[in-house]
Image (cartoon, helix red, strand yellow):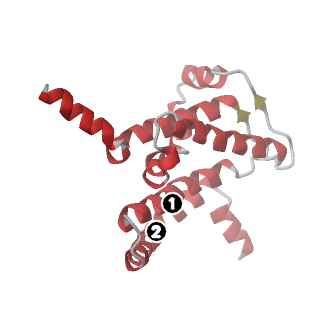
Amino acid sequence: MLNTWQEWVGTETGVVVGSVLGIPVAVLVMLLLALYRRLTRHPLPWRTALADVGMVYGTLPWVWIIMLPGEEPGVAGKLSLVPFADILDLAAHGDVGQIVGNMLVFAALGFFAPLRFAALRSVWRVPAFAAACSAFLEIAQFVLRLDRVSSVDDVLLNALGAGLASLLSWWWWRPKQAVVRERQLVAV
């Protein structure tokens, strides 16, 4: 029984299957959270509930995969501190999936965090926050000796993905003054 459980939570496939099966739970949590916030007269209960669940549900599986040990746990993994070296190597070998996967790690955080936290309502703050979170994970991989590659390029790609995702949600959280200025310019 324990071995089966480890196979599910300790593999990338298990994490992906668990995430897909968790969709109804995530939707239920979002609905209950929104209803609770509505009853307590919280401003924007549906938006904040969606943002909270979206950040966690969209980021946690990726973080789980990142923190899975490699083939030899307890062995120090590779450390790559030369910017763009790994990206160029992956591109040269046609491993676009690895590049895109790294860009998706904090994409949900980048999309939903500005909706929830006013301090992150900046196209520059979101990638900076994602880079800090990513650097923490890369350092943890190395310190915990998970037999994984800890790379500065992962930090760059994670931050880029979060920044691009924040642009996708920008219309939803953009400063309202920008809209007023646009209307004033059109009127002139």
Q: State how far apart marks 1 and 2 are (Cα).
A: 7 Å
Which residue is depicted at the point 53% across and 37% down? 125
User: Does label 1 or label 2 sit earlier along the sequence?
Assistant: 2
Residue ID for mark 2: 26
- The front one of 133 and 62 is 133
- Estimate how packed mark 2 is, as few (under 14), some (14 to 19) or many (20 or more) residues with alpha carbons within 10 Å: some
**Residue 40 placement: quadrant:** bottom left
Where, quadrant-wise, is the C terminus in this rendering?
A: top left
Helix, strand or loop at label 2? It is helix
Q: Position of residue 70 (x, y in %)?
A: 74, 46
- Residue 74 in the image: above or below residue 182: below
Any mark on residue 73, and which?
none
Q: Is label 1 in contact with label 2 (beta carbons under 8 Å)? A: yes
Residue at the spot of label 1: 57
The secondary element bearing badge 1 is classed as helix
Question: What residue is at 32 percent from the left and 43 percent from the top?
Answer: 176
Residue 115, image x and y in percent? Answer: 42, 52
Q: Amino acid at mark 1?
A: Tyr
In percent of width and height, residue 153 lies at 64, 29
Left/right placement of residue 3 relative to residue 60 reads right
Q: Residue 112 in the image: x percent, y percent? A: 45, 51
Q: Disc 2 marks which amino acid? A: Ala
Instruction: Residue 61: name its quadrant.
Output: bottom right
Position of the N terminus, as image quadrant, is bottom right
